[in-house]
Amino acid sequence: MALYSEKVMDHFRNPRNVGFIPDADGVGEVGNAKCGDIMKMYLKIEDDTITDVKFETFGCGSAIASSSMATELIKGRSVSEAMALTNQAVAEALDGLPDYKMHCSVLAEEAIQKALEDYYSRRDQTKSE
Ligand code: FES
């Protein structure tokens, strides 16, 4: 069996939603200290729905494929659905990752959660102003 699924290779070669959103409502950046890879997610949120999402990933192929798949999984979804996205769901949607590459999908889960936390804290700040 090939080490990487066709889906992983597809999302690595043609990543979806690469880039940044200048007026994002939430931004989350995470990194893995061991491998040094970095992932940044930008969210645009309207009426509790993720209307746009983009990412910048400086990392391995699995991290790029995971970011790409994660953006596809949360686009058009509610904030709570995005918050509930797990790295396992990302890996499953990619038809699996090798065990030693599972940590790459964790970055995607963490980056989205951090971007949503940023969204919530900005919203709370606006409310209290
Ligand atoms: Fe670090 Fe993939 S090797 S995210």
Image (cartoon, rainbow, N blue to C red):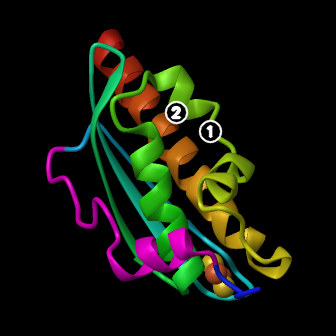
Q: How far across and down, in percent of the image, does residue 91 sit?
A: 67, 59
Q: Which residues are drawn in magenta?
A: 5-23
- Residue under the image location 39 percent in, 33 percent down: 119
Q: How dense is the environment of label 2, judged by Cα within 10 Å: few (below 14), some, or many (20 and up)?
A: many
- Residue under the image location 47 percent in, 36 percent down: 116
Q: How far across and down, in percent of the image, does residue 110 sit?
A: 62, 53
- Is label 2's Cβ within 8 Å of ligand 1? no
- Name the outermost residue toward the front: 1
- Assign a secondary structure to mark 2: helix
Would residue 32 be found to the left or right of residue 27 on screen? right
The quadrant of the rendering that contains the C terminus is top left
> Is there any visible trace of residue 129 in the rendered image?
no
Q: How dense is the environment of label 1, judged by Cα within 10 Å: few (below 14), some, or many (20 and up)?
A: some
- Name the outermost residue toward the left: 22
Q: Depth check: give the residue in front, 5 or 117.
A: 5
The residue that mark 1 highlights is 85
The magenta stretch spans residue 121:
no
Amino acid type assigned to the residue bearing label 2 in the image: Ala
- Residue under the image location 47 percent in, 74 percent down: 64
Q: In which quarter of the image is residue 25?
A: top left
- Assign a secondary structure to mark 1: loop
Q: Depth check: give the residue in front, 15 or 49.
A: 15
Indicate whether 48 appears above or below 114: above
- Name the outermost residue toward the right: 99
